């Protein structure tokens, strides 16, 4: 799958700030940067200023609240998280290509929640991915083809898909009913295809094993 870079927005979460050159390259090339509340703390203290800060304000440092109040968009809703608030904010601005970084680390429950929400965003019509320090989470619907390389590590997390099959992976896949069952696969060539009916999430590493 290929994500267009034109009008590319990046969301910075309040997890671990990325150190991977792959994630940082996406951030540096972003057209528009939104920080999820506390994600602004480290980003701003590194010398940058986002285009917007979105969230309920509970993890935003007091000095940043004062110095950058003109770009803060408070959303006190407790029925969803700040990552989703940032996605909705960008959709309202017309962005369709969104990358999330800083969504993993610190708290495992937040990490799992943030990853699972990618399918919801895809269903909203957004072309979206999450970049970590190790690879990329991509939500998928039905059959999808990925560019790859030999020995690239691949994991498939089934959400609602049936008739799962793969071409170009080391090990056969099936209709997984538990997330661990689709982990630790491997690409064998320059592309692989996941055949499916329904929704799933694919994780691909930046480097080969």
Image: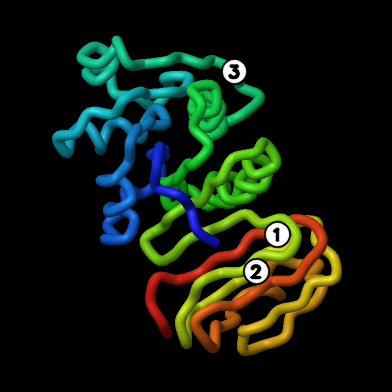
Report how far apart the C-alphas of labels 2 and 3 lie in the structure: 32 Å
Visual colour scheme:
rainbow
Is 51 situated above or below 177? above
Mark 3, residues whose alpha carbon is within 10 Å: few (<14), some, or many (≥20)? few
- Going from N to C along the chain, the mark reached first, 2 or 1, is 2
Q: Which residue is mark 2?
A: 156
Closer to the camera in the image, 6 or 106: 6
> Dot 1 lies on which element?
strand
How busy is the neighbourhood of tag 2: few (under 14 within 10 Å), some, or many (20 plus)? many
Q: Residue at x 37, y 24 (%)?
A: 53
Counting from the top left corner in percent of width and height, residue 122 is at 64, 44
User: According to the image, label 3 marks what residue?
Assistant: 77
Extreme residue toward the right, this view:
163
CB under 8 Å between callouts 3 and 1?
no
Total count of labels: 3
Q: Position of residue 7 (x, y in %)?
A: 40, 37
Q: CA distance from mark 3 to mark 1?
A: 28 Å
On screen, residue 25 versus residue 165, left or right, reads: left
Q: Which image quadrant: the C terminus?
A: bottom left
Q: Residue at x 65, y 69 (%)?
A: 156
């Amino acid at each position: 799958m290929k994500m267009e870079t034109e009008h590319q927005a990046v969301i910075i979460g309040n997890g671990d700030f990325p150190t991977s050159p792959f994630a940082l390259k996406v951030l540096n090339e972003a057209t528009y940067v939104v920080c999820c509340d506390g994600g602004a703390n480290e980003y701003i203290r590194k010398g940058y200023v986002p285009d917007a800060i979105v969230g309920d304000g509970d993890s935003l440092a007091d000095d940043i609240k004062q110095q950058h109040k003109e770009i803060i968009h408070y959303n006190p809703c407790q029925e969803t998280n700040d990552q989703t608030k940032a996605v909705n904010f960008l959709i309202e601005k017309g962005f369709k290509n969104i990358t999330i970084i800083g969504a993993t680390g610190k708290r495992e429950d937040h990490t799992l929640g943030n990853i699972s929400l990618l399918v919801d965003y895809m269903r909203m019509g957004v072309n979206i991915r999450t970049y970590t320090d190790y690879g990329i989470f991509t939500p998928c619907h039905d059959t999808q083809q990925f560019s790859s390389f030999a020995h690239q590590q691949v994991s498939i997390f089934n959400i609602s898909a049936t008739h799962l099959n793969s071409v170009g992976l080391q090990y056969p896949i099936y209709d997984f009913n538990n997330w661990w069952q689709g982990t630790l696969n491997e690409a064998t060539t320059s592309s692989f295809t996941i055949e499916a009916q329904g929704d799933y999430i694919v994780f691909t590493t930046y480097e080969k094993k």
